[in-house]
Image: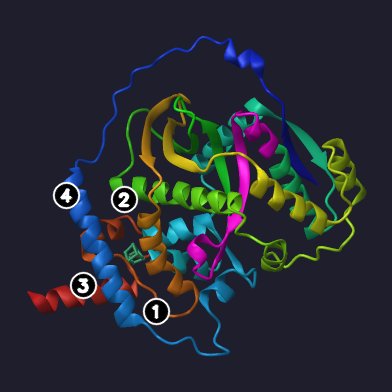
Amino acid sequence: MVQLFVGWPNFWRLMRPIVAVKIQFEVEIVSEEEFEAIDAAIQEAAMQEVEATSRKTRPGLLTPLDKFRGGLGYLSVSDLTAQFWCEQQMEYNFLAPEPKPETVQMQLGKDIHMARELELYDVVDIKIESKEDKWATRFLNCLNKMAFLDAQQTIRELPVFGEPFQLGVFVYGIIDELHFNEMGQLEISELKTRATNNSLPSKAQQNKNFLQAMLYSIMFNDLLEGKLATTTLLSKFNLNGLAALSEDVVKFANELRIPCAKLIQIADLMLSRFKTSNIPKISSVVVEYCSQFSHEEIHKTCLQLDESWAHSKLVTMLPYWKGERETIGVEIEEAWKCHRCEFADICTWRIKKDEECRKLK
Ligand code: SF4
């Protein structure tokens, strides 16, 4: 059984008075110039590492995409953001015998996301009998939310998929929120909850959050441009487009006035809905930080979509997944991440870097 959120406008919410709350926040103090210099140095070092550790993919050798994604053939956006933080740490997490248990903070974050979704949607229970049913409900959900976007309404939890910059790796993710800003631009908003009332994360963490929102935006814009074919979508998720859908899913499709009995029809309809819609591309990216205690907004950071920045990051990151290079850890400029890392004592990358530093002294 899955629960799907089906929306209709909450007009009463528009009548609610808006109370402005001014909150002091603290940030880790690094100037923009300093940060850009550090970022450029890290990028440069990462590219050098990529070149130094490049290797040809050998036929028959399992790639990290095969090994860690259990033959799924695609990545989630959170895989990429974990890699962006520290690829070596992400790999150690994949290799750990048990997945990390959910913390109280993670649960609180989920609850806040759920509460936001429930502000716009009602829950519908749908009986799922196959993976085709599961994806059919996701695609129907997408179709339903596209209709709200067409009417210039805010939507939350929109699934997106695609191959950003056609770099050979398929990616799936769920957008927190899309809305139209005061200039009429379509804006993506990524919600991050914090176990504090007034502090922002480090600049590195903020960049990771921006990368996440930018990847969603790039995939959404690609869908509007019709860059994804139905056959690719189905094959990447290993789905049988001709499989019959469960009675519940077909009933749900009928309720949405989408009378389709086969997954391929729903997938086709969804992709052509993206392609033929008049919805503008996402141009503005917002990351909102909200307190897990007060549920109040701590701060909002806004940027224009920067495709070349996101492209430069993926060009460095994706060869790892395709088995074209060895694993890379953090560069010396970001060694502070190692102090908080649970793998610091066993990390071969950190030990190697320590030795290199000692030799230089
Ligand atoms: S110790 Fe440092 S380099 Fe190693 S996994 Fe942790 S953060 Fe990455």
Q: Residues within 10 Å of mark 2 (few under 14, many from 20)?
A: some
Residue type highlighted by circle 1: Glu
Q: Is residue 49 magenta?
A: no
Q: Is residue 148 magenta?
A: yes
Cα separation, mark 1 vs mark 2, equals 23 Å
Residue type highlighted by circle 3: Asp
Q: Position of residue 312 (x, y in %)?
A: 36, 62
Cα separation, mark 3 vs mark 1, equals 18 Å
Q: Name the residue beneath numbered marker 3.
A: 354
Q: Name the residue beneath numbered marker 4.
A: 34
* Mark 4: secondary structure: helix
What segment is highlighted magenta in the picture?
Answer: 145-171
Q: Name the residue beneath numbered marker 2.
A: 204
Q: Mark 3 vs mark 4: which is more N-terminal?
A: 4
Please tell me whether residue 81 is drawn above or below residue 202 in the rendered image: below
Q: Residues within 10 Å of mark 4 (few under 14, many from 20)?
A: few
Q: Is residue 124 visible?
A: yes
Q: Are dots 3 and 4 in contact, CB under 8 Å?
A: no
Q: Quadrant of residue 115?
A: top right
Cα separation, mark 1 vs mark 4, equals 29 Å
Q: Which mark is residue 326?
A: 1
Q: Is residue 107 visible?
A: no
